[in-house]
Image (cartoon, rainbow, N blue to C red):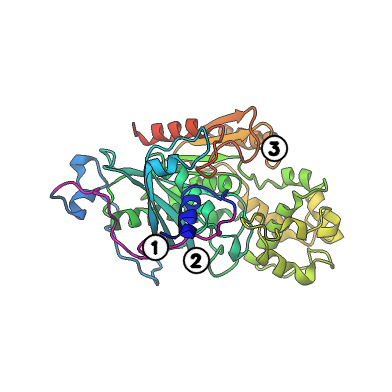
Amino acid sequence: MSSLLTALVVCGALWAGCEGSSSSLADGGDGSTHTERDGGFLRDGCTLDDCALNDADGLDAHLPDAAPPDPYCEKNGCLRSFNKVGDYTQEFLQGAVESGVTVENGYTVYTLAYFTDGREALATVTIPYQEGPPSAGYAIVANAHGTTGVGDSCALTGTVTGAGLAGTFGARGFIGVALDYPGLGTEGVHPYLVSESEGRAVLDSLRVATQLARLQSVPLSNRYATAGLSQGGHASLAAAAQHETYAPDLDIRLFAASGPATVWAELWRQGAAMDGPHLVYHALTFWAWSKHYDYDGDPIFSSTLTPDIDETMQTYCLYTSEGEDTLSPMLPTALSDIFTSSFSAAYLSGSWDNYQLFGVAFELNRIAPFNSTAPLLIYQGALDEVTPESHTTQVVEVLVNDGVTVDYQIVPDGGHTDVAFGPLAVPQIMTQESITTIRQHLSIR
């Protein structure tokens, strides 16, 4: 294996923190696609159908049989294409992570494309690579990522970060799937913080990970969970709200979130009234909503920004791995310099005046009570300056008062990104507890 590919594999299997490496993962050592999985997961004398459908062994007995990839499929959660990146042993991974990170098993990394709610989306999947599966088969956990931007270059599939997010669960005895939302690396605009799109992408990522695992002869438990940080926390809770009607075929045992974006207008206005780099999230939201909901009313962006705002949003991301320009420096830090005076006034007052579409969008996409099918687990850092603890506490109180079961944990020393559901290689405050809790809900010992 070349030295470059070795560096990509080390970083790609773990996290985006390797300096001097490419931001894209290379193909697996054999350069193959649509390959059969090695590793001896099948019992002696057992065919794929026998292993996947044997009730006596506690394995899944009613999800659809594994269909081959179809680049034109339009069934929600169907697999359009996939590529095997490579296999990584426990010893290899444990030697590369930071001190304090536990790697329980090796895993195989795949990237894929799937269909969700009329759109194509991308994802990274990590499947445990070890001598044998749990007696009940593997559970699948989706990890929805936080805000990266809205342009195609902001997708995490095929990058070291995407592999690390899937590896957070893949290295702990689960099948991990780290999804990109529609429009990130695929056709069309990313519907940023649009609950319906995000939630369905999360649910369909569980379906497509199931299909991929079956194609690789991996036995499954037919048990699922979702997790996510920030935007991903909003997406995980959106999946919880839509589970009963959109994906009742999935036996989801837990929906988890850390520092979830609330999308409560009355709370967001508090931040909008203060100048600072955090206003990039407000700009991203209103730009994405204006595209998703086909807004054609009065201008919302300032005359200085309007000529280039589309190109700016679709070119720059919040984070890069190679020192490229990022989105935040491209935007002003004062509300009056980002938006028109009339839009700023309508936003801060909550009247919305000539901008009613955005008021409706907040109502559609805010975290609100729903008919829950499984418990919620919500972590919140007490020191979080992106999603303040007081905001999440208000949301949780509304959910609980409406009968939603929530395990709410405020983490005293936690900020926004150091609590849970980040990439594998870096220790987070609640990683081990979150893994234990997810195992308990999935009945994996």
Within-10-Å neighbours for mark 3: few <14, some 14–19, many 20+: many
Quadrant where the C terminus is found in the figure: top left
Residue found at x 69% / y 64%: 313
* N-term mark: 3 or 2: 2
The residue that mark 1 highlights is 83
Query: Under tag 2, what secondary structure?
Result: strand
Q: Is residue 368 above or below residue 413?
A: below
The residue that mark 2 highlights is 119
Q: Is residue 169 left or right of residue 333?
A: left
The answer for how far apart the CA atoms under marks 3 and 1 are is 39 Å
172 in magenta:
no
Point out the stretch of residues depicted in magenta.
20-44
| Residue type (three-letter) at the residue carrying disc 2 | Arg
| Residue type (three-letter) at the residue carrying disc 3 | Pro
The residue that mark 3 highlights is 388
42 in magenta:
yes
Q: Is residue 395 left or right of residue 176?
A: right
* Viewer-proximal residue among 352 and 304: 304
